[in-house]
Image (spheres, rainbow, N blue to C red):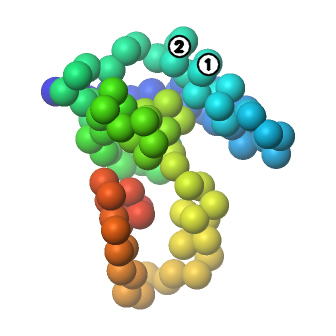
Amino acid sequence: MKNVDYTGIYSLILPLANLPVRGTTRLAKFISGLILPKPDNNGVIIKTIHGFHLWVDPVKDKGVERSLFCLGTYEQGTLHLMDEILSPGDLFIDIGANIGLMSIY
């Protein structure tokens, strides 16, 4: 399984996705699909913009894992809120954790 670091590409694409204009995230994912190499059918280990690695399968999962592969992050607002509310040592329960993005973050 391939371990990749596309954080340089994410830093170019993510500002477009973060614009407060409808459709910019979809456009950013489209551009990302043109720039990034096609993922394997077995998935890929990506380095997120948050500095940790996650195994994702963007071929099979078109939601969270596709966003992570294309943009290096998912639900930035939720992650920012976690930064604001939680302190070291706090207890956080990630119910329905999916692939564990929030738990690892």
Residue at x 23%, y 22% (from the top left corner)? 41
Q: Residues within 10 Å of mark 1 (few under 14, many from 20)?
A: some
Residue 89 vs 31, above or below: the answer is below
Name the residue type under label 1. Answer: Ile
Q: Are marks 1 and 2 in contact (CB under 8 Å)?
A: yes
Residue at x 49%, y 83% (from the top left corner)? 87
Query: Under tag 2, what secondary structure?
Result: helix
Q: Position of residue 86 (x, y in %)?
A: 51, 81
- Foreground: 12 or 31? 31
Residue annotated with mark 2 = 35
Residue at x 33%, y 58% (from the top left corner)? 98
Q: Which mark is residue 13?
A: none
Name the residue type under label 2. Answer: Ile
Q: Is residue 68 visible?
A: no
Residue at x 83%, y 40% (from the top left corner)? 21
Q: Position of residue 53 (x, y in %)?
A: 32, 44
